[in-house]
Image (tube, rainbow, N blue to C red):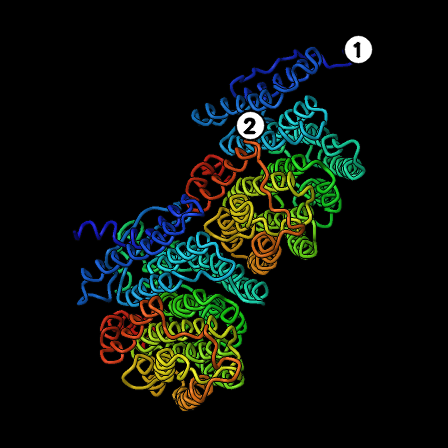
Amino acid sequence: MMNFLNDWGLVLTIFLPLAGALVMMAIPKQSEGAIKLVALGAPLAAAAMGILLMLNFDYGDSENLQFMVNRNWIELINSNFILGLDGLSLPLLALTLFIVPLVVIYSWQHVPNPGNPKAFFTLMLILETAMIGSFLAQDLILFFVFFEVTLLPMYFLIGVWGGEQRRYASIKFFLYTLFGSAFMIVAFVALYFLAKAPTGIALEQLRALGGSYADMQAGDPLRSFGMQALTYSGAAGIAKTTAIVIFGGMFLGFGIKVPMFPFHTWLPDAHTQAPTQGSVILAAVLLKLGTYGFIRIAIPILPVAARAWAPIIGILAVIGIIYGALGCLAQTDMKRLIAFSSVSHMGYTMLGISTLTAFGLNAAVFGMVAHGLITGLLFFIAGSVKERYHTLDIKRLGGLLVSAPKMGWILGFATMASLGLPGLAGFWGEFPAILAAYEPAVGLNVALFRTLMVLAAVGTVLAAGYLLWLYQRTAFGTPSEEFENDPNITDVNKFEWLAWSPIIAGIVILGFFPGLIFNVAGPAVEVIARTVGG
Amino acid sequence: MIATLLQLLPEADFLSPTIDWHAIAPEMVILVGSLVLILLDSFKLDKAKPFMPTLASLVLLGALIPVITLAIDGSTRVLFGGSYVVDSMSLVLKALFLVSAYIVVLMSTNYVADGDYWESEYYSLIVAAVLGMLVMCSARDLLMIFVALELLSIPAYMLAAWRKGDEKSNEAGLKYYLMGVFASAVLLYGMSLMYGVGRSTRLDVIAENLVRIGDGRGAPIVTLAMIFVIIGFAFKVSAVPFHTWAPDTYEGAPTPVTAFLAVASKTAGFVALIQIVFYCFAARPDIIQPVFAVLAILSMTVGNLIALKQTNVVRMLAYSGIAQAGFMLAPFAVIETNREQALSSIVIYLVIYAAMNLGAFAVIIAITRKTRSAEITSLGGLFSYMPGLTVVMTIFLASLAGIPPFGGWYAKFGVWQALIGGNTALGYGLAIIMAINTVVAAYYYLNVAKTMWFDEAPDGDTAPVKIPFTLIGAMGITVVATVMFGVLPGLLTNISDFSPVAAALGR
């Protein structure tokens, strides 16, 4: 069993959804039943594979990559097909494998207009493969390929199945991300040419990787895209200013994806126009590619540059928190409001990352998972509300607790979780991130980060403000006249229960047992924090 | 007359060169093939017409056999006193030309027959042009290069005007001809100057003399000659500001011919540039690097900006081809510090570009069978009635935009790698300008995808149309190649591993 998992576990987890997509292409368009069966079966098979991996994962050794696969891929540029799972990847892998089947269940009855479930699910399965691949790739070029493959399916999901402004939103999403990733790949190539073999213990670790690294001497050109090798090198041999510029390229790539202020403007449009399923995947998983990239790639590979960039990232993160929250207060559309709250919440994650401490990074990893679950649920609810009311205009809504009480309570639960109520997952994403800013990594400007901490804390008050106000306006009171006796407005149906209850359970469980993530990711982020000297 | 001329010759024994027939077997197959096509047409007339495409395909694929046997043999063969060289790089390029031309024949089969154009001549001209391309791959001599260039250009001038009854096609042919002849004149003038200072037509000898001249006497003429030669080929590869013929010619020419011009003919221009620059002009990188940097920046930026405004998909592809030529010209600007990677990145780009661009044209031919128009708006709603074709076209467009996992990403990646690996300010600058241009380009490629996927059919006509199997074959080959090169670029880097060439260059 262990041998099988070591050789095939990660590969199967990544490519089972893609295999499902290929099978689906062979099914005629008319047989919707078979299509839906494959659409659910492939992510479930991947999830089963993921559960097997997680059961056999050595949690005592979560700082090291496990189940590693290492095959030749593009020999000319020494880029290899390297996959690995460690404590940092595991929570995000779990999140992806958890969310996608729920999205399929939610779509069971209602593939959004203009229908065509075959194309819809095919794109979703391709998207899942790309997302999982990004979290497991341990080679920069492989990561880049998976990272980019997420673009096209999402582009079409928004563009074909989206709202009124879908054309504008989809191309905006695409061009923004492509702009960032074009600079990211230039940064990767620069690393390839400039990084050199390190000295001391890091050199021993590098040599232990074997292959072409086995006989490297300190100062030899590394000529590698392997994340591990580059991390051990830690940008040895790259002048500080050069490293800062290279970090800038990655910052564009990942920062746009997160999205950080001032690159966030694609997000409200994409979220608002995307079909519910698209919004959920975008919020739950795709945004995490950016923050994951910072923790996995940018910071450990360019530690010196990371320290130079940390204050800027911290400041932009807090601007994002406040700006996103103020933006929320001004929204009249429920979905757009949730989108802006994403900008604000991802700001906490980035603040945690900018402290460069193990505590802050750990908070960021938790924040990613918590935000994925909570905002995913909020978008699900927004989608269901839209389906019933045919509008998301907050002014026209109201009295959800009267017309659909169960849905009203779930919305209440989700808003409480989102504003960071202790005992639910959201709390553990925000609070430790703020706390981490009290004591950033040694050498960073303490006064600055403490100011940022205070501002971020103000952000939580604003969050409570806009979320409670949203809840008050949509759920309380009595339904307006136009919706009073509308027969379309029904309570939560069984597919929605099936899709939502696991998320609700997840939010509660993580709220009570935050160690489930903290203990897994902790050792992995501690290693990273040590490399930046935090 | 001849007798008197012969008397003027110095008293020397004429030694007929020993010819390595194996080395020139591909060219011989093509030469004989094109003659057979013409003769068959002359004697059998209409009876032979239906078999012409098949025959042309057989000739092209037949020429591939000696290319493969030569590749298996693997040794570098030098002929005609060093002016004709068959090495691994030239074999890769010959195979590329033969396969590209084969795909063009597949695309042409129904187009030419349905349009009631002259058929037999069409195929014999394509095969004749391919002969010029094959010669170009091995030419290491100014004269040889010029002959090859004319041999591949003149049939193309005629092919561009093949739709005789159509004004636009006549315009296409005439424009292409006039511009092409003008470029040839400039090129020839540059070559004559080069002969004057280099004292030979052989590239390696000229290179030695260029090094010897250095900045000394004759240096200004060297600069002038190099710039003229580069400009001559810049017309051929449609680099800005010598691109003006391309959009009109592409739009007016029959679409399969456009594909042939945009891919095979442009590749031939690049092959000529590779020969001249890497084997000769590289001796003076200080002169050519800035020239290529300017050409590259102008081509990618201007090509992209104009492509944004196009409403006709063929014109859009013409301008996008100009921009892509800019990407391919960029590695020439780091030739001094990163010669090997610059060479391999250009060749890899050419191979991938051929696959994805031919594919895109094949799909356009298939679509226009229904829409009878190449306006982008006429593609609306294609996804609803021909989803397979839409997906295939999307793959080509995504590849052209450089999105993994389709081949185009690796082509662009290779160029970035060459530029940054050169570790010069010029290289970094080009890499960044190229990154911005990649994003601009993505917009207009996606705009076409958007129309096919998101818009409604313009006239509400959503009856699918039957696609001939030759066209399906053309799309099949190109789509498989595009995906394979993207997922496993290692395949490509293995066949284009020019270690012998690299060794020769490393002198």
Which of the numbered marks, if any, corresponds to residue B231? Answer: none
- The reply, left or right, for residue B17 in relation to residue B233 is left
Task: Say whether mark 1 and mark 2 are on the same chain.
Answer: yes
Q: Is residue A441 visible?
A: no
Residue B258 percent coordinates (x, y): 67, 38
Q: Is residue B115 visible?
A: yes
Q: Is residue A206 above or below residue B26?
A: below
Q: Which residue reaches farthest right?
A: B1
For label 2, the crowd category at 10 Å Cα-Cα, with few meaning under 14, some 14 to 19 and many 20 or more, is many
For numbered disc 2, what is the local secondary structure?
Answer: strand
What residue type is disc 2 on? Answer: Val
In depth, the one of A395 and B413 nearer the eye is: A395
User: Which quadrant holds residue A195?
Assistant: bottom left
Mark 1, residue position: B2
- Tag 2 near tag 1, CB within 8 Å: no
Q: Label 2 lies in what chain?
A: B
Residue B499 percent coordinates (x, y): 45, 37
User: Which quadrant holds residue A318?
Assistant: bottom left
Q: CA distance from mark 2 to mark 1?
A: 32 Å
Mark 2, residue position: B85
